[in-house]
Image: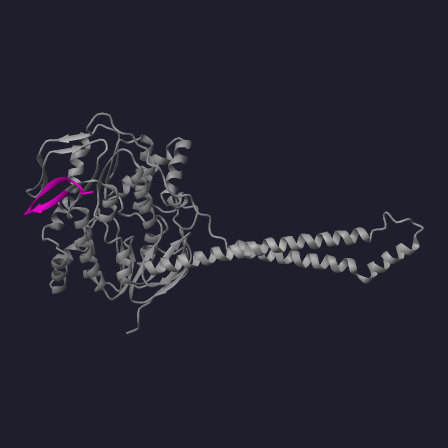
Amino acid sequence: MARLFLSFNSVEFSYPSSLYPVLKNINFELAPGWTGITGENGAGKTTLLLLAAGLLSPGAGSIRGIADSLYCPQRTEKIPESWEDLFFAADNAAGRLMDSLGIEADWPYRWETLSHGERKRFQVVAALWRNPALLAVDEPTNHLDREAAALIRDALAAYRGIGLLVSHDRALLDSLCGNCLFLREGTVTPRPGGVSRGLAEEDRERTEQRNLRKKLSEEEDRLTAEAARRWRVVEGSRNRLSKRRIDPKDRDTRGKINLARLSGKDAVGTNLYKRMQNRVEQVEEAREKAANPQERKRGITLKGQRARGDRLLFLDPGSIPLGEGRNLSFPELLIRPDDRIALSGPNGSGKSTLIRHILPRISAPLLYLPQELEAAESRDILDAVLREEENLRGEILSRFSRLGSDPRLLFKSALPSPGEIRKLMIARGIFYDPALIIMDEPTNHLDMVSTGLLEAALAEYTGALLLVSHDERFLSTLTKRSWTVKRAGPDSALTDEEKLA
């Protein structure tokens, strides 16, 4: 059987509503094995997956695709269409996959009550069971706790077709991928190895470019000075060969000048100057070619206020129903104006349910970032920003840019990416000086650079924080108290304790 290949040849793609192409002059060829795709939010990673899976057609160029292709989406609103085939399959592969990832028999029938982490595991199992020749997977470890992420990694490692993997999880990309595609400014740079190796190569190339620009700039300065010196020589020669101040009767001097002109001494100096000018222009052109794209300013300040009084929230001990007869019990809960709280626990234990229980009981100014938004909600948020008064809209988009995304990319796609919408909500929300920021899985969907920028901004924020995350390093950097949810049979229980310094 012929070996499978996926190839993109001079591919360009634009959405109908976009003024600029999302992707331009894309060229690469992939054989079986995992290829990572990385880039900032809105760079076109999901668009590239959809093109590879045959769900979009290029506007220019050609794709040598594979008919047996499947796209596993980033969003988790909808249950996979093939779930019934998976559940009622008469083969052992389906059972082994579901057992390995802890898929329970009632999950398809209570999809709306599943956590996003549970839905993500189900999505990946359904895609792997189909075992297509080409599998395009979009952010498979979003929402997952450490144990579930490890199970997903092991399951993906067993796949033997052509795999395309969009992820901001560096460890996952490094462990699975034999090469990576780096998206920047609508173009793709293929690099061998995992993402860490590719980023190191990118840093090395940037250093070489900086050194080259410095060398060319110094050479340009030297040649410019030499050209100026030669021009002064030419001007001096012209003055010496001028007859304007020579007495018309001084035939001897005039004759010498005519002889010098005939011998070409003036032309030699002029030609030397012109050659030097040409060299200056050549070096200047080379320096411009070596220039980096203009870097955007990065980093924002999260404005906020310290709430008056001694508490933002107080709850007596109680419990919250989680559905299917399950409950989450909690002790007395208190949020003080300067608290920085980490809320952690396994998928499906009730963390997001607790947040939804808390939200209506807080009267202080609040910035809330939910774990997931549906497509319609994302469009509404973008429309609301576009309706803002011009100066405010400009400030929001400026802060959006400083969170690591190009505002121009925001208007290229049919629907902004989940990462872009998160940044837009943060950029808009900080104008209301929140006394409390609640973020449910804030690093989901964010690229690596943007996660660092958000972490730095939250570290300087003066109000209270309540952060839900499976990113232990992120939580350890920013929080001082722990609300931990643990499973106790079918139920869950929350504990509250101060972190050790």
Residue 406: x and y, percent?
40, 45
Residue at image location 13% in from the left, 50% down from the top: 108
In depth, the one of 296 and 16 nearer the eye is 296
135 displayed left or right of 108 = right
Q: How is the image coloured?
A: one colour
Residue 433: x and y, percent?
31, 30
Residue at image location 64% in from the left, 53% down from the top: 225
In depth, the one of 475 and 147 nearer the eye is 475
Q: Name the residue at the right extreme.
A: 249
Instruction: Provide the major secondary structure of the magenta segment.
Output: strand
In depth, the one of 288 and 23 nearer the eye is 288
- In what quadrant of the picture does the C terminus appear? top left
Residue 417 appears in the picture as rendered = no
7 displayed left or right of 284 = left
- Magenta region includes residue 125: no
Q: Is residue 146 above or below residue 497?
A: below
Q: Is residue 298 above or below residue 189?
A: above
Residue 311 appears in the picture as rendered = yes
Q: Is residue 161 above or below residue 288?
A: below
- Magenta region includes residue 496: yes
Q: Is residue 177 above or below residue 111?
A: below
Q: Name the residue at the top extreme.
A: 309
Question: So how many labels did they put on this image?
Answer: 0
- In what quadrant of the picture does the N terminus appear? bottom left
The magenta segment: 484-501
